[in-house]
Amino acid sequence: MHIERVELKRFKRFHDLTIEVPKGTRLVMLAGPNGCGKSSLFDAFKARHRGFGGWGTNWDLTYFPKAGEADAAQYNWNSSVRIGFNKPEPSDQEQKRMMFYFRSAYRNDPQFVVNSLARQGKAVDEFRFEWMIHNDAAVNLNYQRLASQALEDLFEKESETTTIGEFKQKLIGDIRASMARLFPDLMLNDLGNPLTTGTFRFDKGTSRHFEYKNLSGGEKAAFDLMLDFIVKGHDFNDTVYCIDEPEAHMGTRLQAELLDELFRNLPLDCQLWLATHSIGMMRRARDLETKQPGAVAFLDFSDLDFDQVQSIAPVHPTRAFWERVLQVALDDLSALVAPNQVVICEGAPASSVAKNKSHDANCYNVIFESEFPETRFLSGGNSFDVQSDRLALAAGINALVSGCSIVRLIDKDDHSVADIEEFKKQGINVLSRRHIECFLYDDEILTALCMKIGMPQEVGGLLQDKADALTASITRGNPCDDIKSAAGQIYSSAKKRLGLTGVGNDPASFARNTLVPLVTAQTKTYEELRHCIFGI
């Protein structure tokens, strides 16, 4: 079972939200700061699952409806939460209950001892907690399920030739293997005696057969998730798994390796949704997507006003995305995480009071963030400042950041061919056109603008407006390729001809907000600009 579309109306913090997930996605990563709505989304899934699965709705008007909206109380689990799956929803009660499986962020089961056993009901009928704010203790229950299943198998199903070692491997082999990959020095030994002092027992170093309660917080957290995932995976094999904050109590390395284990043990027809702040899990998810294109979707809940109609589609994990993730995880320390490459370009630096400071750098960062997520553009002043590193940006980065490569980029302006060759010898790259505006206001990009807003009939007129503006600029004594001097007239003509509003209050902001997103990897303009900067 895979989710492909979600529609929420007046549910908790959401006014009207639509989420799209591409077909074939097996892992969905929810990113965003605390309070952005990730857990609320899981509550929506759980409310619908409870109603659809026959456990009773318990539609609490103080918890589920969006507070402050006049019509919120008119909605219920069926009208407020709509979910589109990759296959028809089942009619069989057991199959309905199998559709979702949840773990809340509050997984506290610090110790337990079992001294009697009872036959366990079906896993799909288990209902441990109501809402995502409730505690979700599963270790004890999974122990009892394993132990009772072991007795049933031993007396009714197991072959007489099976040895004790083989039987133990069947019972806990998968869990033991996962834990060994997560903690190489920790081994799940056995279940103890479930009729007297039943609990999981482990070996570590010279310590033998110590009880579950003696594991560290991180070991317990990882063991809880893997145990539950593997035990329940036998019954929930056509399911959307939802885990809130799986990284709790774990270090970054362990978080990444836990995601590997969860993904490795995810049943084939299932989908896994994780709401996380974990850098380790996000980076490992990116690695999984690189190895299996289309398998992972990143949904970014950051900076969205959910009092308005919103639509969320998967985002490419660009550098801007990583900076938001790091900001949540590390707060002010996120600024210390350096890119692999820095390009110092022309433009008023961020420390200046100029109106359009860092204009060129901001444009380049957006244009190239998808293909070059580990590259960061910085404005280093005028052409001479960049050439000489007058602001000491390159020197400072080299001193502070090990292994970060530095590229210096200047506009072509009126530099001669000989000048450009000399710059290249000094390791300074030069644009193939006078300045960045020549690329942003290229005919190809203006054409794309007309196409985007559904006015292809205006392409010829807009390009003529550009030609007229350039002619007027030349008349004022500017060079024939000085698009920047003509940008104001082109900007005004485009707004008037195309009826544009909310596209920027001046030519520079218009270029950043409206034209830059049109310079995509599919355009000749992008290819030329990429070659100038990266040589490819």
Image (cartoon, helix red, strand yellow):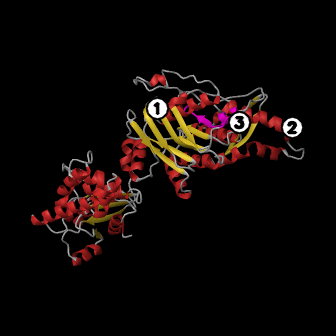
**Residue position marked by numbered label 3 in the rendering:** 200
Q: CA distance from mark 2 to mark 1?
A: 51 Å
Residue 273 drawn at (x, y percent): 55, 42
Between 353 and 511, the one nearer to me in the picture: 511
Sequence-earlier tag: 2 or 3: 2
Which residue range is magenta in the image?
Answer: 90-107
Residue at 37 percent across and 59 percent down: it is 520
Sequence-earlier tag: 2 or 1: 1
Query: Callout 2 environment at 10 Å: few (<14), some (14 to 19), or many (20+)?
Result: few
Q: Which mark is residue 361?
A: none
Query: Mark 1: which amino acid?
Result: Lys
Would you identify the image quadrant in which residue 124 lies?
top right
Query: Mark 3: which amino acid?
Result: Phe
Between 367 and 33, the one nearer to me in the picture: 367
Residue 266 drawn at (x, y percent): 64, 46
Q: CA distance from mark 2 to mark 3?
A: 24 Å
**As displayed, is residue 385 above or below residue 212?**
below
Single out the residue that lies furthest toward the right.
Answer: 160
**Residue position marked by numbered label 2 in the rendering:** 156
- Can the viewer see residue 377? no
Quadrant housing the C terminus: bottom left
Sequence-earlier tag: 3 or 1: 1
Query: Callout 1 environment at 10 Å: few (<14), some (14 to 19), or many (20+)?
Result: many
Question: Image check: 336 left or right of 119?
Answer: left
Residue 94 drawn at (x, y percent): 70, 34
Badge nearest the viewer, 2 or 3: 2
Question: Image check: 178 left or right of 9?
Answer: right
Q: Is residue 4 inside the magenta stretch?
A: no
**Residue position marked by numbered label 1 in the rendering:** 9
Residue 403 drawn at (x, y percent): 40, 61
Which type of secondary structure does the marked residue at label 2 adopt?
A: helix
